[in-house]
Image (cartoon, rainbow, N blue to C red):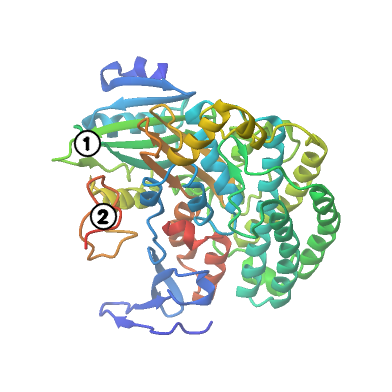
Amino acid sequence: MSQAPGVTIETTTGPSPSMVLNMGPQHPSTHGVLRVVLELDGEIVMKADPVIGYLHTGIEKSCESKTYTQAITLTDRIDYLAPLSNNLGYCLAAEKLLGLEVPKRAQYIRVLLTELTRITSHLVWLGTHAIDLGAMSVFLYSFREREEIMKIYEFVSGQRMMTSYFRIGGLALEPPTGWLDKVQRVMDSLPAHIDEYEDLLTGNRIWMARTKGVGMMTAAQAIALGASGPLLRASGVPYDIRKAFPYSSYDEFDFNVQTQTAGDCFARYQVRVAEIRESIKIVKQAMEKIPSEGPFRAEMPGIIPPSREEMKTSIEGLIYHFKIWTEGFAPPAGEVYQAIESPRGELGVFMASDGSPKPYRVHFRTPSFVNLQTLRTLCEGSLIADVVACIGTTDIVLGEVDR
Amino acid sequence: MRKLQEWDARSVAEVIESRGETTVVIGRDDLLKVAGYLATEPSLKFSFLSDIATVDRFPMEPRFEVNYQLLSMDLPARLRLKVKLSGSDPVIPSVFGIWPTADWHERENFDLFGIRFEGHPNLRRIVMPDEWEGHPLRKDYPTEGYR
């Protein structure tokens, strides 16, 4: 492991002298700007204390001064590896507040795109985790496949990363003609690529030595620490919000919740790779389900913008169009909590409305923030080099940790 | 919910059923008792604390509402506990002993709202710098900050 720049070393006197080592915030294996204060006894980690906040941008505060629609663009930037999952969580919360029913076609398209997001997010995780542990080539391959899916995002929404494609009530735009053919092509080639990664890693002795038995966490610890997503499932808890509290018609899809019981880094690797395969299954089902025609957003005068046609031909349509885009819409007062299964775990959106066109309070319960708390448990008693593996398998996105 | 009322109806100040979600309003002094019951009662087992989110109702009183999102994986069910706090005395017992995940959630709410969680082992700022003044998510804190 290379030494972080600006290492500060303090020694304490006592029966067993320990050393405090500062890792990060400018360290490539911390996946952003995470600082970990390590207390070491030789090369053994006695205590690992994550220090966060370097990327805090006050997104929750900014949401309070924007209309409900404007705030969607901020949600992209929370977890920049899974923007569509964040869009979905936010939109579902606002729709719950409004009591809005989204057309089936939009729901299926949302499912398809969020599953693609899960695939891209897991691919980035796989690549970066592998490069942390010294397997360079997997990174190059997984980013190659990720780019193909990013091209689909760009084709559909106009943006590779900050998509803002889901809107309250449905989608921003009608998806372009021929987009499903592109999805089909990527889905046809992807399973073979996943096999390639597994050939490189699963049976690899170095990979196993670096991940098996490293970063252990039991199911009871995971639940107590609030871990969710693959981190929880790799410890043997078959909890997936898509099954437990289905949203956006997930109950109509046939897929399995992937679990492992070992609770180590290797188990988390296995869960995530298996989830990519499950997501491909869901995407294929969604492609069959999506009707070629039909509304892509709900109808609710005064809340959902009228179609272009209606805006130009009817007086009510014009008034609503003007009002929605100048002052927004005001959901009735109340509070909701909507959770979705993002690639990293439970992404919860707590939204409070006071009956004005701006959200009174939006709180994002982000999976990275909570999952990062487990780092202490994962690292204790392991070697310094394993800290890198542990940070990698928690799959944190610092933008999401700090918001 | 019914179980909770059967167990101790006095601690439940109000029950709000809205948009398919259940919110139980309880008093500050009952928090630890109710939380401990919900987390351990075998037929409920709200053993997973999803989130703690505060809402600032400034200038109304009681000013702060602390919302605990509980999850029972066995049922499965969600439940929201709500505790109202006055602006002059935003102190609440820490649930760290019941759900260790509350550690960072409580630090976050302390940092951004200035709510003091009594009994928390390490109540420091978490996302803002240690020397920061004020609590940014309070409604009387300007969005662009103090200049």
Label 2, residues with CA under 10 Å away: few <14, some 14-19, many ≥20: some
Quadrant containing the N terminus of chain A in the rendered view: bottom right
Residue A166 disc label = none
Q: Classify residue A139 by image quadrant.
A: bottom right
- Determine whether the residue tagged by mark 2 lies in a helix, strand or loop: loop
Above or below for A371 versus A9: above
Q: Residue at x 34, y 77 (%)?
A: A18
Residue to which mark 2 is pinned: B123
Do the residues indicated by labels 1 and 2 lie within the same chain of the protein? yes
Label 1 or label 2, whichever comes before in sequence order? 1
Quadrant containing the C terminus of chain A in the rendered view: bottom left
In the image, what residue type sits under mark 2? Leu
Circle 1 or circle 2, nearest the eye: 1
Q: Position of residue A352 (x, y in %)?
A: 39, 35
Separation of marks 1 and 2 at Cα, in angstroms: 21 Å
Q: Residue at x 69, y 77 (%)?
A: A136
Q: Position of residue A162 (x, y in %)?
A: 58, 57
Q: Residue at x 54, y 29 (%)?
A: B76
**For residue A364, side relative to residue A95 (left or right):** left
- The residue closer to the viewer here, A99 or A374, is A99
In the image, what residue type sits under mark 1? Arg
- Determine whether the residue tagged by mark 1 lies in a helix, strand or loop: loop
Residue B63 disc label = 1
**For residue B58, side relative to residue A256 (left or right):** left
- The residue closer to the viewer here, B147 or B27, is B147
Q: Position of residue B19 (x, y in %)?
A: 48, 24
Is residue A150 in sight in this rendering?
yes
